Image: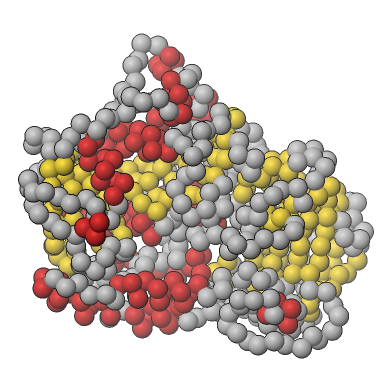
Amino acid sequence: MRWSPLVALLLIPALAGCLDGGDTDALQGDRVLDPLTEPVYELLGHFEHRFTGTTGIQLYVDYYLPDTGGAPVPVILTMTPYQGADPVTVPGEGGDVPLTGEDAPYSQFLVDHFVPRGYAVAFADVRGNHNAGGCIDQTGPEQWQDGYDYVEWLGTQDWSNGRVGMYGASYDGETQFTTAMMQPPHLTTIVPTASVSNQYEWSFYDGVPYELQPLIGMGSYFAGSAVPSTSPEDAPAYPEKLTCQPEQFAAGADFSGDHTEFWVERDYRPMAKDIQASVLHVHGLADWNVRPIHIDPLFNDIQSEKRGLFGLWHHAYPDRGDWLDLLTAWFDHWLLERDNGILERLPPVLIEDSTGQWHGMDSFPPLDQPWLELELSADGILAQAGGATAGELALHDRPEEVLAGGFVTPPYGLLEPVDDTPGELRFTWTVPEDLHVVGRPEVLLRPTTDQESTHWAARLELDTDPRCAYLYREDTRTQSVCINSGYQDTRHRDGMDDPKPLSPGEPYDLAIEMYPQYDVLPAGSTLTLVLSNNDAEVQQDPTNARSIVPVGDGAAWLRLPLSPGSTELPHDELP
């Protein structure tokens, strides 16, 4: 067994046991932990199978088996829309299986790493893609059923030991969550990475569209699935791929932000409590494709055995040098039932802060924590409670400024300035001591607006940090550093399911919740809260709205969630 940071973690005293109540004495006594599996098996062959699913469409899975001499093996399944239009070469048992070039498997890594260690590796098509029938329906209930069917077919083959795990990122993470919520009996564990928790929040933040994402999300997957298979066996399934696209495109073209029945059907967060398989939930806190809002509420609602791994990477797998060992230990434990101590050694949440330090915590966002409340003041500062100057501050959505800045959709055109009201309000605070902000900050306001709707944006900037995790496009940078943001469409101020216009001139309550984060604010740094009715990173609401924000006298607050306490864990050898 090669030495690695994870192996060191498995051999040191049970640091994480004190976090989750694990029995640490057993690990320090006579118990000998199983090492990681070693690559000892040859590849038996590459196989494929077509069958009719519960919903009546053709399902397709191809899989790679190790040569174990007939001993049954567990299965690692990736359910994906990203395979090509035709299957890779399937020469059958004992054949010369090509693993490079155009005939390479969907995930070379999974096959190369896990098949020699005694695992079957399978790749299943989501409906409407590759060699599966039906039409693509991302996060839709029929796709959930397909996942159930795939797991149960793989778990009941004579070469299978009946234990199926799932793996994959982005769309391939979403299919794990939805399959697990269907409770297939043979699903043992999932490792969803960078996954949405619902389709709505990939396209909107509390009613505010992320640029063109509603349309891009629906249209791009249809375009990818439109390439037909050239196999005669798949020809009858191809016309089915077109049947649900009118509904998909209609939803994608709706930029209202309303939480319609289409989006409700594709929100599986309420089913998180139904998961019975174990979960290793992985997400980057700097992922601006599938933003970290998808962690909450989801992770804390899962009731099965779970661990969370969150840190400052983008739309990718964890930025940890021991990720492969950690993943192997997880599958070894759950699918091969090896006693390697991974559950005792991993805290409930392993999370990286903005300085690169790793922490062990009980939940994320923390379920019970202190809050720091700062009042917005008329003189442009953030003050301790009771220390703010009262007043009323005006701002305008200034669409002419935002629309002139670059890529904004749809292209409403440049508008003439209405007046000299500022387009944003800024409030600053000098951080008195190192603060760990852990969770979701929020801004509470009671403004008035002269239009029936407007968008609000709240942004936190920190002047001493060289990164900018807020911006969606990595090639864009600003002088001040954006560490968090949040948005709100005033039509949805009372909930996504209750859209209603404002009464111009009448005050309304507004709570703007930001993304989950773990940022260390250094002592002496300047934290700035920026409020606006428009933001260049989301789609605009050019209503020429003018808003009045009362401050002081308890009228407006920034609330920062602080760390409830954590265990600092050793730094990893990052790649």
Position in image of residue 160 (x %, y %): 15, 42
- Would residue 85 appear left or right of 93 to someone viewing this image? right
Q: Is 10 above or below relative to 379?
A: above
Which residue occupies the foreground of this view, 301 or 112?
112
Position in image of residue 120 (x %, y %): 20, 44
At 84% from the left and 47% from the top, the residue drawn is 430
Residue farthest to the front, as pictured: 101
Q: Is residue 513 visible?
A: no
Position in image of residue 282 (x %, y %): 46, 46
Position in image of residue 332 (x %, y %): 30, 33
Which residue occupies the foreground of this view, 97 or 230?
97
At 60% from the left and 84% from the top, the residue drawn is 411
Kindly indicate the quadrant of the structure image that contains residue 26.
top left
- Would residue 206 appear left or right of 342 to someone viewing this image? right
Colouring:
secondary structure
Which residue occupies the foreground of this view, 49 or 500?
49
Q: Is 346 above or below relative to 545?
A: above
Which residue occupies the foreground of this view, 557 or 131?
131
- Would residue 126 appear left or right of 437 to someone viewing this image? left
